[in-house]
Image (cartoon, grey):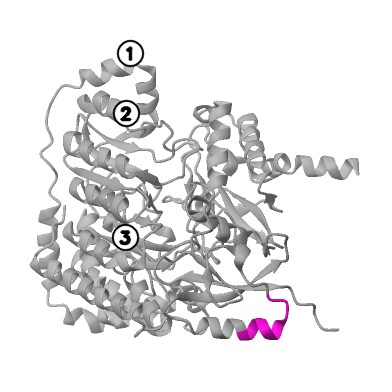
Amino acid sequence: MYRYNDFDQAFLDERNAQFRAQVARRIDGSLTEDEFRPLRLMNGLYLQLHAYMLRVAIPYGTLRSDQMRQLAMIADRWDKGYGHFTTRQNIQYNWPKLPDVPDILDALGEVQLHAIQTSGNTIRNVTADHFAGAAADEIADPRPVAELIRQWSTDHPEFQFLPRKFKFAVTGSPNDRAVVKAHDIGIRMVRNDRGEPGYEVLVGGGLGRTPMIGKVIRDFLPPADLLPYLEAIVSVYNTLGRRDNKYKARIKITVHENGIDTIREKVETRFAELKPLFSGVDQEMLARIEEHFAPPAFRNAPVEAYETARDRDPVFRAWADTNLAEHKSEGYAIVTVSLKKHGATPGDATSDQMRALAELAQRYGHDELRISHEQNVIFPHVHKSDLPALHEALRAADLATANVGLISDIIACPGMDYCALATARSIPVAQEIAERFDQLKLEHDVGPLKLKISGCINACGHHHVGHIGILGLDRAGVENYQITLGGDGTETAEIGSRTGPGFAYDEITDAIERIVRAYLDLREGPGETFLMAYRRLGADPFKAALYEDEKAKTHAA
Amino acid sequence: MPRSFTPKVVTANALLEGDVVYLTEDDRWTRDLNEAELLTDEAVAEVRLLDASRRQSEIVGAYLADMAPGDAGPQPTHFREDFRRTGPSNYRHGKQAEGPSRS
């Protein structure tokens, strides 16, 4: 994992000292809120519904145990004993007080974490496949590239006042777990026909008000061209992107309005100008960064303990079936720890749980943790013989929920319980749906199903790419929930289609149950997932099930 | 015919704590909506907001929020303001835990 050098640390310390002085000037009245606001946003500090909120970046979702322990310490000392992991691999503290924030940032700096550019019209936290460096299907570890982009984009003088925020995601696997097609720039590490490594670059993806799937701007970019090419894209966007209308300012609109071919032409022209200015130092830096991401010393040991536990313990087996993924190294597994216990707030972890995760990462996981955009925690490298003990320890920490990839593994944004932008609540909807399917004992039967909830049109909860998506809106002063079906956030990305009229807060769980029961009736067998069935059948039979009551009412009337 | 004016309160977030505050008749910031001044005259409301917005060293983001008169004091007419005076629904944090009397 990447460790800061003296330059990195000095930069961060300096930046934190600057912000400390800015906070002091705001408190003593020498800065107005209008003057202070852009400064606090650049440092990840929002003002939400009930309190300030500090958004801390977890670059490409990678954490060491000492960092996780510090996140727990911060939660205890300056917040309410928990943190909220988000869909952009950040952690959010919901209750910091303004005078404490400089101390929090210093505490983060001690473990090489920061909140820089987690807000504002800048390049945001660079996200990556949470199975990076571990997945069996991986071509290359995307994290060195993500770290290079983090360093390049942090405080980049040209890109501090972009038309709008700008999000990068990188994957090194053909199976896209990083939703790269829904990012401003998505990078896929690929190999060409000759087997040489390079990048496929996508541009103009994004969810929100106008959801768009990213378009390929370059199908094969040689490794040495990466930074100048990315700089060319952002540079073209910086001049071409609209600043007259916030809702048309994202690069997805720039690409849509100008056409991908025009954008590509302009990017290539700019790239030709920029490329000679890159002396190759970027490649030297990348090479040094790559050394930080050397795989751990995997051990070669028998896995009987795992097989035995699987045979003997049905609880362990159920957990292993849902929460493990295939590791590239023989005898190892990738463990996803669900932060979606039925009825709990998706993505929340208490400080005790964070410390338990840190402890277990040290004991069983080569000191590595990951945060997924699906709001779960991952131990990327666990030897299978350690899995029974790990599972037992997770149970003790109330972290052994066996539901990864199932309907209760819900992505939910904070919604109107916290967010100043929200138009409706998300969390209680997620809680009720998860509890319903737990009571019905149906979710293992239903199988893989991604349910995603956003509490406003901005779509932090990725509802457009949920197999079932829920969007909470304010309809004439009442919470109302629209459903979309058939969305997909993977390499076969698709934006879901709206079913029709929305549902009231107290109707939405029943509505979701009707859709799921319709799927169970319609599927050809357990091998046909919800998404497969939807793609075979289209929306109509699901809509019929969804609105059956409405029709009955109409007939009765 | 002029549109009828919905009564309002001046509300904001406290500068240091970030929590929700309301303006009282005697120009204090209170954490308790019951103590807020209910403004029934549009012109008066605008002036109250203007004056309150200038108190930059105390609050952030003052605005007028719709309220209805109630026995105990102003009552929210929209669920957003109801959450603001209560706190989140997933944990007993915020005003519902701290009690509104702290001011």
Q: Is mark 2 on a helix, strand or loop?
A: helix
Label 3 resides on the chain identified as A
Tell which tag, 2 or 3, sits nearer the viewer: 2
- Asked where in the image residue A338 lies, by quadrant, the reply is top left
Q: Nearer the viewer, residue A355 or A30?
A: A30
Dominant SS type (magenta): helix
Is A433 drawn above or below residue A258 in the view shown?
Answer: above
Among all residues in the image, which is located at the extreme top? A312
User: Could one spot residue A326 in this view of the protein?
Assistant: yes
Identify the image quadrant of residue A327. top left
Task: Name the subunit of mark 2.
Answer: A
Instruction: Give the number of the disc on residue A182.
Output: none
Three-letter amino acid code at disc 2? Ala
Residue located 63% across and 36% down the image: A513
Q: Mark 2 points at which residue?
A: A396
Locate the C terminus of chain A and report the quarter of the image it occupies.
Answer: top right
User: Between disc 1 and disc 3, whose residue precedes?
Assistant: 3
On the image, the x and y values in percent for residue A125 come to: 32, 63
Q: Nearer the viewer, mark 1 or mark 2?
A: 2
Residue A56's tag is: 3
| Residue A160 percent across, percent down from the top left | 32, 79
Q: In this view, does A378 lie above or below A242?
A: above
Q: Distance between the residues labelled 2 and 3?
A: 28 Å
Of the numbered discs 2 and 3, the one sitting upstream in the chain is 3
Distance between mark 1 and mark 3 Cα atoms = 42 Å
Residue of label 1: A312
Tell which subunit mark 1 falls on: A
Query: Magenta stretch?
Result: B39-47
Q: Would residue A425 appear left or right of B45 to someone viewing this image?
A: left
Q: Which amino acid does label 3 sit on?
A: Val
Per the model, the C-alpha gap separating discs 1 and 2 is: 19 Å
- The residue depicted at 36 percent of the width and 60 percent of the height is A96
